[in-house]
Amino acid sequence: MNSIDPIVMKRRKFWGWGYEGEGVSDAELLDLGSSIRDRFGLKLQDLEAAPTIDEIELRESRVKSKASLEHLLSADKWSRAEHTLGKNLGDFVRGLERKYDNPPDLVAFPEDEGDVVDILDWAEEEGLAVIPFGGGSSVAQGIEPIVPDTFRGVISLDLRKLSRVLEIDRESRSARIQGGVLGPHMEDQLRPHGYSMRFFLQAFEFSSLGGWIATRAAGHFATGFTQIDDYVQSMRVVTPTGVMSSRRLPCDGAGVSDNRMFIGSEGTMGVITEAWMRLQDRPSFRASMSVPFSKFEAGVGAIRALSQSGLYPSNCRLLDPVESLLSGAGDGDDTILIVAFESADHDVTPWMNRALEICREFGGRVESDKPADSSQGAVGRTGAGGRWRNFFVKGPYYKEGFARMGILRETFETACTWSAFPELHARVVEAATKAVKKECGEGAVACRFTHVYPDGPAPYYTVIGSARRGGEVEQWAAIKAAASEAVLEAGGTITHHHAVGRFHRPWYDQQRSDVFAAALTGAKRAVDPGLIMNPGVLVDA
Ligand SMILES: Cc1cc2nc3c(=O)[nH]c(=O)nc-3n(C[C@H](O)[C@H](O)[C@H](O)COP(=O)(O)OP(=O)(O)OC[C@H]3O[C@@H](n4cnc5c(N)ncnc54)[C@H](O)[C@@H]3O)c2cc1C
């Protein structure tokens, strides 16, 4: 048996974000709430109490553990509740309403790949659905055990005990890492070797390597290595028919990519137990600046030029005036472009100077000739960029707070070409604003670019409004539907990095071609003939 690091088994909240007993205080939430109310004219409600486990009722488990697997399986109430809901607004609200309607019957905690094989074999024999679970940070209902009645029950397969960095290849600067490791624990194991993966998505603290690969997550790099796809060298996936293992290669031209058939498979084709991942040296040179623009369009022009300049900034985010106001980065008058560079090898000042020249060419107000640079540490943590970063880092904790305060706040995101962006943006903002007015009365729609590519941006929208207690799920569903229709009609994707899950299925089905849907279904049937893996996600159950 592996020795398990105590952090792996530290109790996580069954509702909300983080470890039990940790997070932001009620006083901080109330402060945040009143400043948002003042900025956006919202109604605040009394801070609702987070649910306690005694208040939750779960239906009886329908499945009895097989004796030989009993040590890996749990029907404990806390575990089942913890594996019932994900982390989108509807999940938080249903948790607050104490509605845990679809708990898994059992939660499995495999300790190695052999255990995963045994659990899948047993599930197939018994007609049980299996839902791989990494950090549970899905915002697309990817881990919620909603499966057809034809299954006798559901197992949530929690990979947290597969949490080790197993091997490092210094020459090829890559590491073999188990799929269940959470971001901070993985970085803790890489740090003594001088490496980092530098893949800091907003949910970094409570999301796993396997989850990132399964959902095609996107990290903090705004250009270049944005998606996890770019980091995967090879992987092992346990499917119900056997193990898919790919060869370690820097690049491979041999037919359809085996890795890419499984990257993004969202638990529907098997369990990612480990992967060889590309690493990076820890940066020692950094520079960061934020540049205000009087007009959003001018900021868009500048960031497009930056994305096509070949400079590849590590951070390159555009915050529209509403996003600046919402995050406290600005006063709501200006669009703000945050640009940063990092390198372990060379001084990045010349890159920054050229980036600032580009900003000036588009009317950006570059206040200093000297970039806020530093050779270590706290770069980008002051000024507008720093205020935005602080809000971003605490964002996951604030999410549960907004639900408790009766503020309807949720996000959606997409990607499109630069040529499609002006129309997409106009249609999305119009549709979402109209829906917010109808559903909430008062509110706002904010936009930022999370990632930019030479051929287009990934716009990310935040909706904020007054919640109607008990009606939040319907309010958000109406706003989300209006926005999603506008996104698809204007040529965008239903998600750049939030995955499809169960929530995005209707729009995902519209955007993909029938031929591709048939190919994907065929591939799934080949590796999962009993269709037990995460039924209903990506293809029909
Ligand atoms: C506040 C917040 C901020 C977020 N920010 C970002 C962001 O910046 N970038 C981004 O890309 N996403 C973001 N997300 C979404 C989410 O964090 C990602 O989708 C993440 O990759 C999910 O990882 P996880 O380990 O939590 O997966 P889970 O939520 O546990 O699972 C997600 C899906 O992957 C499958 N899965 C999980 N592990 C495995 C495995 N080992 N093998 C096979 N299938 C598996 C599950 O079955 C499910 O379908 C955010 C979410 C929240 C709540």
Image (spheres, rainbow, N blue to C red):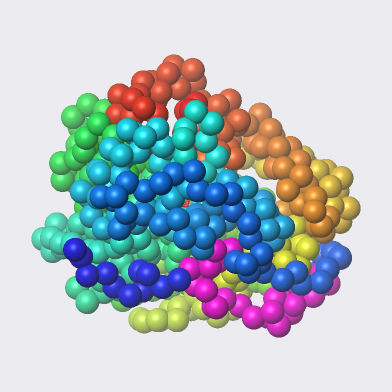
Side (left or right) of 252 relative to 509: left
- Quarter of the picture containing the N terminus is bottom left
Kindly indicate the quadrant of the structure image that contains residue 488. top right
Residue 408 at what x, y percent from top left? 75, 57
Residue at coordinates 50% horizontally, 48% vertically from top-left? 61
Residue 503 rendering spot, x and y as whole percentages: 59, 40
User: Is 36 situated left or right of 130 in this image?
Assistant: right
User: Which residue ends up furthest to the left in the rendered image?
Assistant: 171
User: Looking at the image, which is closer to me, 113 or 434?
Assistant: 113
Q: Is residue 212 left or right of residue 165?
A: right
- Residue for point 71% across, 37% down: 481
* Number of marks in the rendered image: 0
Q: For residue 89, what is the image quadrant?
A: bottom right
Q: What range is drawn magenta here?
A: 12-38
Q: Residue at x 35, y 81 (%)?
A: 375
Residue 24 included in the magenta stretch of the image: yes
Residue 528 percent coordinates (x, y): 33, 29
Camera-side residue of 491 and 479: 479
Location of residue 330 in the rendering, given as x and y in whole percent from the top left corner: 69, 71
**Residue at x 81%, y 43% (from the top left corner):** 435
* Residue 215 seen by the camera: no
**63 w.r.t. 351: above or below:** above
Which quadrant of the view contains residue 402? bottom right
Queried whether the magenta region covers residue 466, the answer comes back as no
Q: Left or right: 420 with respect to 36?
A: left
Q: Can residue 182 be seen in this view?
A: yes
Viewer-side residue, 98 vs 344: 98
